[in-house]
Image: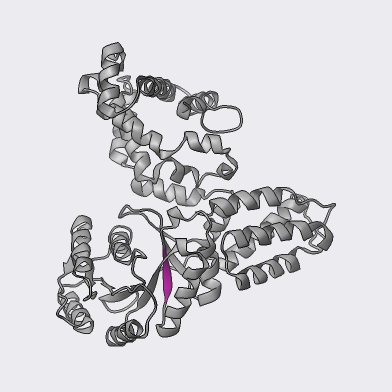
Amino acid sequence: MFENLTDRLTKTLKNISGRGRLTEENIKDTLREVRMALLEADVALPVIKEFIAKVKERAIGQETSNSLNPGQVFVKIVQSELEKAMGESNEALDLKTAPPAVVLMAGLQGAGKTTSVAKLAKFLKEREKKKVLVVSADVYRPAAIKQLETLASEIEVEFFPSDIKQKPVDIANAAIAHAKLNFIDVLIVDTAGRLHVDEAMMGEIQELHKAINPVETLFTVDAMTGQDAANTAKAFNEALPLTGVILTKTDGDARGGAALSIRHITGKPIKFLGVGEKIEALEPFHPERVASRILGMGDVLSLIEEVEQKVDRKKAEKLAKKVKSGKGFDLEDFRDQLVQMKNMGGMMGLMDKLPGMGNMSAQIKDQVNDKMTNQMEAIINSMTKGERQHPDIIKGSRKRRIATGSGTQIQDVNRLLKQFTQMQKMMKKMSGKGGMKKMMRGMKGMMPPGGMGGGMFGR
């Protein structure tokens, strides 16, 4: 998310200059560029006007400290105002109530509401250690009830059965009664989505809200609809007392207009971002981290959290012991590393959170795309166990068989083996004295001038 905005803003903010202080004259062109960048990102006009006015007011006459030049001061102001526009800090779910805490999910059809129910249930179960029950009150689409049941089974949370012949209020009340009897901490109620905002739909969900009095009423909206997402959220907020928003499909939205507009237009916080199709692809929304990402400064905190949650520690420890004992690093270990990377949102998902990666050239971005990771995994899967453990035996006829089996070319197999050899050398360096320093030097040598890519990811 924010790819286009990041590119535009990082170029724009590089051009700001001034002697000792920022003046109206020397920030005029930069502010015009910032305004254009926000318009292109499909940010709502009232949000842009207020944002530019606040940045201008704070920047003019701002003295620069000894440690910061005028450009850095200006970037700091822009970052601070981006944070304010999005809500300053993360607002977690308020589940402090006598159990079950009822969470009502609302939204339009196709916004990813039912999937978000499952993602939220998984998040609460794993990160908050809550006992969760999910129920569908969507009596118009039998497929939606079945979908939620399947997802609940996949993430191993309890599903309360419902039927299209029942009334939504009766379904929700029965689920609440069941939750009380079974000591459930959180009940998430999925509701019917429509293709557009209509009176009948609003009337039904208002009645449901009144009957079950949820502690959280979350609106699920598709980030790819840009500022329309904020306007739809506003219409819902006028009918329902929303407590927050889940912004879905943010991995497919390069503009980011919705994230920057929702808080201003609805007055409600974005509480979560849907960052992919996988059931664990839900992140708490941190405005300060997102602002940092928009300005190309990365989001190392989120990256660290992701590593802690998604890296298989037992496997990592086992690999470390294996390498230390001198048994070496084979292609099965290499494949495990690729799978771990995929679980963390792929190479581009990781790089998106690293500082300075917004300035990577398109060529390097192309070299590290996730198709290559999938291709490498497919090549390793086409090998026999013996070949994976002893890559030295992979010669001519074996290479041809592996390429055919994985739907790739022989040069792709050669490239993978070359990359594996480099990784193996790095692992050897790591197991010795002063390992980490040696490894970093090795990685530097594998990169082309000016960034990632080159030997490790190059073609």
Q: Position of residue 321 (x, y in %)?
A: 31, 28
In-front residue for pair 131/454: 454
30 lies left or right of 363: right
Report the residue at 33% width, 63% height from top.
Answer: 116
Rendering quarter of residue 42:
bottom right
Is there any visible trace of residue 103 in the rendered image?
yes
> Which secondary structure dominates the residues rendered in magenta?
strand
Kindly tell me whether residue 157 is visible in this rendering. no
**Image location (x, y in percent) of residue 384:** 21, 22
Q: Which residues are magenta?
A: 243-247
Q: Residue at x 52, y 59 (%)?
A: 256
Q: Residue at x 55, y 65 (%)?
A: 260
Tell how many labels.
0
- Judge from the rendering whether residue 448 lies leftward or rightward of residue 164; answer left or right: right
Task: State which quadrant residue 420 falls in.
Answer: top left
Q: Is residue 396 left or right of residue 163?
A: right
**Relative to 367, is 122 above or below?**
below
Color scheme of the displayed model: one colour
* Residue appearing at x 48%, y 77% in the figure: 234
Q: Is residue 350 above or below residue 205?
A: above
- In percent of width and height, residue 158 lies at 18, 65
Nearer to the camera, 69 or 412 = 412
**Residue 204 falls in image quadrant:** bottom left
Q: Locate residue 348, reporting x and y percent.
A: 46, 43
Q: Does the magenta segment cover residue 366?
A: no
Which one is nearer the viewer's eye here, 329 or 278?
Answer: 278
